[in-house]
Amino acid sequence: MKVTLNCSSLTQAKPHELVVRFILGGTITAVTGVIAKEWGPVIGGLFLAFPAIFPASITLVERHAIRRKHKFGLRGERRGRYAAGADAAGAVAGSIGLIIFGFIVYRFTRFLNPWLVLSVATVVWFGLSALAWWLWKNFKRPVWHR
């Protein structure tokens, strides 16, 4: 699977799917706020790092892949699972970079110019996330060997 930007997928989302994303994202963000209030911003930040719309989007990715296969008279469950898995792998790759981003900001903002720290942390986040994705794409075992 090649990473591409496809803006036409924005038109495929149905209004109720957007509502589900909004409600789940808002709920996760609100729960994160409660956690931060109870146990502090460091612990709350760990939970906010979890992509707020991920639970909703992963099911929608699977559903859209299945729907595309149904147009050709195919079941599409396997393709839906693979598409959702690829999306989840991308979230993991981004999260790896995000953990290091948070560490850099937490550790160096007190001593250095915040704009410099944010700039460096952003470049490191992007580089580590891209590296994690590349490693996953190039070194994973093929599905048929499992």
Image (cartoon, rainbow, N blue to C red):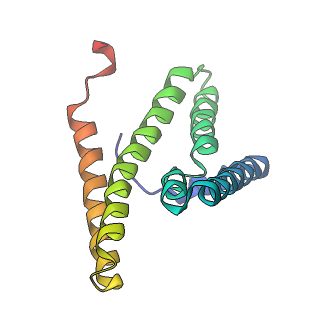
Q: Nearer the viewer, residue 19 or 33?
A: 33
Q: Residue at x 58, y 33 (%)?
A: 62
Q: Residue at x 33, y 20 (%)?
A: 143
Q: Residue at x 63, y 40 (%)?
A: 60
The reply to whether residue 138 is visible in this rendering is yes
Q: Is residue 46 above or below residue 56?
A: below
Q: Nearer the viewer, residue 89 or 1?
A: 89
- Quadrant for the N terminus in the image: top left
Quadrant of the rendered image containing residue 140: top left
* Residue furthest front as drawn: 39
The reply to whether residue 3 is visible in this rendering is no
Q: Nearer the viewer, residue 137 or 73?
A: 137
Residue 26: x %, y % from top left: 70, 56
Q: Is residue 27 above or below residue 137?
A: below
- Quadrant for the C terminus in the image: top left
Q: Nearer the viewer, residue 1 or 127?
A: 127
Number of numbered tags placed on the structure image:
0
- 98 on left or right of 18: left
Residue 2: x %, y % from top left: 34, 45
Q: Residue at x 35, y 70 (%)?
A: 105
Quadrant of the rendered image containing residue 33: bottom right
- 141 on left or right of 95: left
Q: Is residue 27 above or below residue 121?
A: above
Residue 79: x %, y % from top left: 50, 26
Q: Is residue 14 above or below residue 104?
A: above
Residue 137: x %, y % from top left: 27, 38
